[in-house]
Image: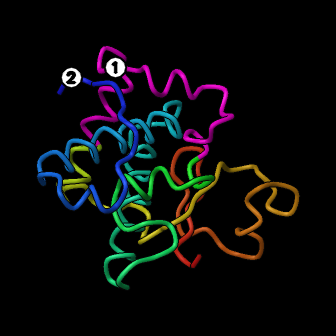
Amino acid sequence: MRARALKPEPDAANRTNVAPAALSDDAVDTLARTLWGEARVEPVRAIEAVAAVVMNRVRRARERGGWWWGGDVVSVCRKPFQFSCWNPDDLRRADLLAVTSADPVFAICLRTARRAVAGLLPDPTEGATHYHRAGIDPSVSDVSWARGRCACAEIGGLLFYNDVE
């Protein structure tokens, strides 16, 4: 799959009128960019774990009839301030929008995203919906949600949590 320019996220009303294949293409592209932006320096297993976090959020939202972080891959990934790579002030945001499959790590992220969206990616995180880099102190950072919680998995340099609402 050749990477394409990222289009603005369609609103929910328009999304229902888009063919499923197009939704899947948008989901794969957005998830791959999220993986690249969040975990490009991590081993493949950690990239897969971040994909699992996104898919766990989508699954949880569908099971509950919606959730604050969104109900599909695109809305979950692009929810403001959930994945820092999508934040408007992120220093590498331009790189995120411009990266193509010629980048070997992005090619890995695309393969991982395709498997995740197709439901073929095992979840090494035990159902995690949140993560942060290891070594970050939740009491003095933007991951205060992790304060007092025990990680359910540590993969690469990331800690994963499955007990966050």
Residue 111 drawn above or below residue 164: above
Q: How packed is label 1: few (under 14 Cα within 10 Å), some, or many (20 or more)?
A: some
Residue 16 drawn above or below residue 87: below
Q: Secondary structure at mark 2?
A: loop
Q: Is residue 47 left or right of residue 139?
A: left
The image shows residue 97 at horizontal and vertical percentages of: 45, 26
Q: Is residue 126 left or right of residue 130?
A: left
Q: Amino acid at mark 2?
A: Arg
Q: In the depicted view, which residue is nearer to us: 149 or 86? A: 86
Q: How packed is label 2: few (under 14 Cα within 10 Å), some, or many (20 or more)?
A: few
Residue of label 2:
2
**At 65% from the left edge and 48% from the top edge, which residue is drawn?**
133
Most extreme residue toward the right, as rendered? 140
The answer to the question of whether label 1 and label 2 lie on touching residues, with beta carbons closer than 8 A, is yes
Q: Which residues are magenta?
A: 84-112
The image shows residue 44 at horizontal and vertical percentages of: 39, 38
**At 30% from the left edge and 38% from the top edge, which residue is drawn?**
29
Q: Secondary structure at mark 1?
A: loop
Q: Is residue 120 found inside the magenta-colored segment of the image?
A: no
Q: In the depicted view, which residue is nearer to us: 5 or 153? A: 5
Does the magenta stretch mainly form a helix, a strand or a loop? helix
Q: In the depicted view, which residue is nearer to us: 138 or 69? A: 69
The image shows residue 102 at horizontal and vertical percentages of: 31, 14
- For the image, the number of numbered tags is 2
Which image quadrant for residue 90? top right
Which image quadrant for residue 75? bottom left
Q: How is the image coloured?
A: rainbow
**At 53% from the left edge and 44% from the top edge, which residue is drawn?**
156
Residue of label 1:
100
Most extreme residue toward the top, as rendered? 102
Query: Which comes sooner in the sequence, label 1 or label 2?
Result: 2
